[in-house]
Image (cartoon, rainbow, N blue to C red):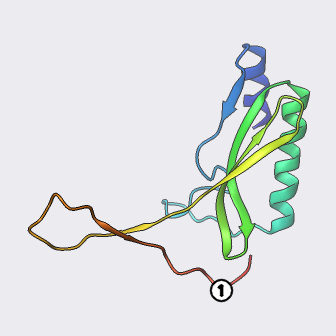
Amino acid sequence: MEKFIAEAAAKGIDTVYYPETNLPGLRGQYFPVEVPRPGELRETRDQVTRWAAAHPILVIIPMEWPGGAGLLNAAFVISSTGEVLGCQTKTKYHQMKTHSKHQDKPAHYSKPKASRSEP
């Protein structure tokens, strides 16, 4: 990661944005992704803040983050001085389509049940 941050800054790019859940990796793909420990996630985010400051560039780093109902899909915005400016979490809604001959009506959505296990 630091290599790409440094290269982007050297080229005059002002923002680096990584793919969704870049850390530790997108679940449900063809490779296993271990459940991260909260301390590792914080240390990784803090390391990215140091890289952003060292190579003055804004970094948006999507990663899993511990939340009340388990791991959240979060994106941290880190300034070119290394400050965490904010975090946005993604809320997923599962689409449940009704079987109806009225196709012009919107589909119904329901919120998934929260996980009771903590990370």
Quarter occupied by residue 61? top right
Which quadrant, please, contains the C terminus? bottom right
Of residues 24 and 111, the one nearer the viewer is 111
- For mark 1, does the 10 Å Cα neighbourhood hold few (<14), some (14 to 19), or many (20 or more) residues? few
Disc 1, SS: loop
Asked if residue 53 lies left or right of residue 108, the reply is right
Q: Position of residue 85 (x, y in %)?
A: 80, 41
Is 42 located above or below residue 5 in the figure? below
Residue at 17 percent of width and 74 percent of height = 99
Asked if residue 52 lies left or right of residue 71, the reply is right
Is 77 located above or below residue 115 in the figure? above
Quarter occupied by residue 4? top right
Asked if residue 11 lies left or right of residue 84, the reply is left
Q: Of all residues shown, which one is farthest toward the left? A: 101
Residue 23 seen in this snapshot = no
Of residues 40 and 77, the one nearer the viewer is 77
Q: Tag 1: residue type?
A: Arg
Q: Position of residue 103 (x, y in %)?
A: 14, 61
Residue 61 seen in this snapshot = yes
Quarter occupied by residue 101? bottom left
Which quadrant, please, contains the N terminus? top right
Total marks in image: 1
Residue at 62 percent of width and 64 percent of height = 33
Q: Position of residue 14 (x, y in %)?
A: 72, 21
Residue at 84 percent of width and 61 percent of height = 40
Of residues 33 and 10, the one nearer the viewer is 10
The residue beneath circle 1 is 116
Q: Position of residue 84 (x, y in %)?
A: 83, 43
